[in-house]
Amino acid sequence: MTYRAIYAYAWDLAETGVREAVEELGARGINTITLAGSYHAGKFIRPRGRESKVYFPEDGAAYFRHDPKAYGEIKPQPSSHLAKQDVLRELCETGGVAANAWLVLLHNTRIGAAHPQATVANAFGDRYVYSLCPSSPAAREYTVALCKDVTDNYPVSGLSLETPGFLPYEHGFHHEFALLRQNVWFNNLMGLCFCGHCLDGAQAAGIDAKRLKAAVRDDIAAYLASDLDFPDDMAAAFWASDALLDADLSNFLRWRCTVVTSLVQAIREAVRPDANVAVIPSVARPTGGAWYEGSDLRALAQAAGILEVCFYEPGPERIRCDVWDVQRRLKGAGHLRGVLRPSFPDLAARQDVIDGVAALVAAGIHDIAFYNYGHLRQASLDWMGDALAAVGS
């Protein structure tokens, strides 16, 4: 079955009514609802919200009934909404569309704050509690168990996995603030993880990670002690030079990709064999920048079988360019899905949505998803339906 999906949250489906939402979306060509089964915090405007227009989801909550015996040190934190309604179960049983579980894996402040030893640590030893480290055995065990638990206990068609890797330094933690202009050189150095697990793993791979950690710490400290603000083009050149010419840094960045790929492979091996596993490699723009998070696009496609790429670009021409580059990197590995936003800031008019979907189909991408049911105006839902009707099934 061709994947024509829309991403959605449990609270939005509960408010609309699962059956009503299924009928509404089915009339617009949607055959799959990709429902958040685990999610982080947020502050969301809901244009069609009936009970509220601004919604604050529970931080780091799971929206399915988990099996506590399936987990080790780290366990999911169930949403209080489950006391009233199991939307994922209801979606699975309603029929009319397939239920696909969308799992945010390592971006979880609630779990990170409770288990700081499993989080990313920068060169100064500061813990990023919003970011579980994919090198941490406890975080890996939790992630694999989460994916297996959903597919063992719910008849979902598959999983879409978000944040399986190393989050960038700037990723939207609550009230991020600095009286310092950010730049790519500073942010990328600040985003590197030097926790004990990363140091040990990189050292075992022949990388002098301890020297690298000290060098990164000294460079950042010197920059913060100066009165300089790097212009964007200069910062980008400084970062490119460091990443290319510092052998330890280059090898460290490549090693991070093996960590993330092996985690995805472990998930694929653990989950129900007939359940699809798709990886959302990054929301970096363009997608080619996903490597910083440890996302080797070709390796992930081979490990999971499906790559579900967010082509979040302002216009069809940029979408076409990003698709071309992703397909060039995949070299035929795995199966490629595309995700579009049929609204501001990407495809903000009906014809843009039609042209964006047509661009994916023209490139051979027929499995298409849209983001996100609760965030979209009614007009965007209609444009989505028009675009799918234009390309057919």
Image (tube, helix red, strand yellow):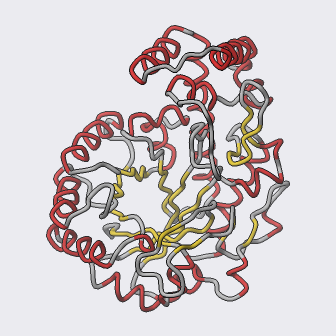
Q: Nearer the viewer, residue 176 or 242?
A: 176
Where does the image place residue 332, in percent across and percent down from the top left? 32, 40
Q: Nearer the viewer, residue 134 or 352?
A: 352
Q: Is residue 140 above or below residue 85?
A: above
Total labels: the figure holds: 0
Q: Is residue 64 above or below residue 234?
A: below
Q: Nearer the viewer, residue 243 or 57?
A: 57
Quarter of the image with the N terminus is bottom left
Q: Is residue 34 left or right of residue 163?
A: left
Where does the image place residue 387, in percent across and percent down from the top left? 20, 68
Q: Residue at x 73, y 20 (%)?
A: 204
Q: Is residue 392 above or below residue 334?
A: below
Quarter of the image with the C terminus is bottom left
- Could you tell me if residue 135 is visible in this image? yes
Snapshot quadrant of residue 271: bottom right
Q: Residue at x 68, y 69 (%)?
A: 58
Q: Residue at x 56, y 28 (%)?
A: 188
Where does the image place residue 18, in percent across and percent down from the top left? 49, 87
- Could you tell me if residue 206 is visible in this image? no
Q: Residue at x 78, y 43 (%)?
A: 118
Where does the image place residue 99, in percent across and percent down from the top left? 48, 75
Q: Is residue 198 above or below residue 76?
A: above
Q: Is residue 173 left or right of residue 334?
A: right
